[in-house]
Image (cartoon, grey):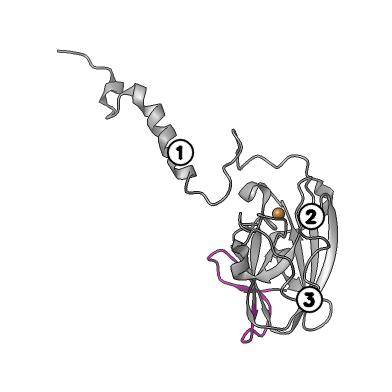
Amino acid sequence: MIDLPTDSLHPLPAMFRPAFCAIALLSSASFAQTPAPPPGHDHSVEIPGLKKELFAGVTAEDLLRPGAEPGSVKVTLVATFNAANYGMNFNGYSHGKANLTIPVGTKVHVTFINPSPVPHSAIVIDRPDTKKLQIAEPWFPGGATPKHLVGQTMGKSEFSFTADEAGEYALACGFPSHAVAGHWVALTVSAEAKVPTLQFGDQPAKEVK
Ligand SMILES: [Cu+2]
């Protein structure tokens, strides 16, 4: 009787297995919408060079809070909140996977923070325009950080706009190509909504407090 090593029971000869895995990885990477990660990139690793004191205490829930005056909201957008989507996220969310819903007519006060050395910005745009490489003007007057196409690094800026038209919009990074790569959260201006609500992924939308 021949004593076979247990490894030989594997359907693929050992010498082919690593190559097979590499081909599987390569083919899945080619379907990704975002640029391929740099070699050795690991999602669990933090983005280097973040000035963390700029957003100490800020959470994902700070994407949408009630404003100081009635009919207003406060939005805090932290670009590169973490390493998700290679840093192209707001408070950890990209590709519209956080959705801010506000009643039509709401005054929106935005604080934009970019703690990273890579330039980012913020601009309110029509949602289909997230597929464009760059957007010249915000949908609502006043709805962008200064020089949004150039962006800013390691800093903070504020802007306000009135969402006076119902529709599906995005709060997107205005730096060229970033929105296409997923650097945006969804903004829904609703004629039916009575109160502002915030939704993460497939979870139920929650009224903001
Ligand atoms: Cu960006």
Q: Quadrant of residue 6?
A: top left
Distance from the alpha carbon under mark 2 to that under mark 1: 34 Å
Q: Which residue is mark 3?
A: 141
In the figure, is residue 170 to the left or right of 8? Answer: right
- Residue 195, horizontal then vertical, whole percent: 68, 82
Q: Which residue is mark 1?
A: 25
Q: Would residue 203 be counted in the magenta stretch? A: yes
Q: Which kind of residue does numbered mark 2 sit on?
A: Val
Choose between 193 and 167: the one closer to the eye: 167
Choose between 146 and 112: the one closer to the eye: 146
Residue located at (37% from left, 28% from top):
17
Q: Quadrant of residue 16?
A: top left
- Residue 83, horizontal then vertical, whole percent: 66, 46
Of the numbered discs 3 and 2, the one sitting upstream in the chain is: 3
Quarter occupied by the N terminus = top left
Q: Quadrant of residue 205?
A: bottom right
Residue located at (75% from left, 54% from top):
120
Tell me the chief SS of the magenta region: loop
Distance from the alpha carbon under mark 3 to that under mark 2: 19 Å
